[in-house]
Image (tube, helix red, strand yellow):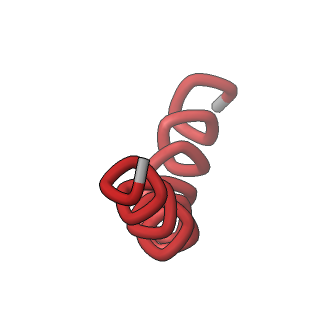
Amino acid sequence: MIESMAARGNLLTYWPLALFFALPQVVVLLWIWLR
C-alpha cells in the first residue's frame, strides 16, 4: 500500500510536467490538421 501511495504521488508530481510538454505538440498537430 505504501508503494502504491508513492507511485500515486509520483504520478501527481509528473502529470503536470507531462501535460506541459504534450500540450504544445497537440496544439501544433491541430494547427497543421486544421490549416
Q: Residue at x 42, y 47 (%)?
A: 1
User: Which of 24/34 is in front?
Assistant: 24
Q: Residue at x 45, y 58 (%)?
A: 11
Classify the position of the C terminus by image quarter: top right
The tally of labels here is 0
> Picture coordinates of residue 33 (x, y %)?
57, 24
Left or right: where 34 falls relative to 20: right
Q: Residue at x 51, y 49 (%)?
A: 28
Left or right: where 31 falls relative to 18: right
Residue 26, relative to residue 8: is it above or below?
A: above
Left or right: where 25 falls relative to 27: left
User: Which of 1/30 is in front?
Assistant: 1
Q: Is residue 24 visible?
A: no
Question: Among all residues in the image, which is located at the extreme front?
Answer: 1
User: Which of 20/33 is in front?
Assistant: 20
Residue 13, relative to residue 6: is it above or below?
A: below
Left or right: where 16 falls relative to 14: right
User: Which of 11/27 is in front?
Assistant: 11
> Picture coordinates of residue 2 (x, y %)?
39, 59
> Picture coordinates of residue 13 (x, y %)?
48, 75
Q: Residue at x 47, y 58 (%)?
A: 5
Question: Among all residues in the image, which is located at the extreme left?
Answer: 3
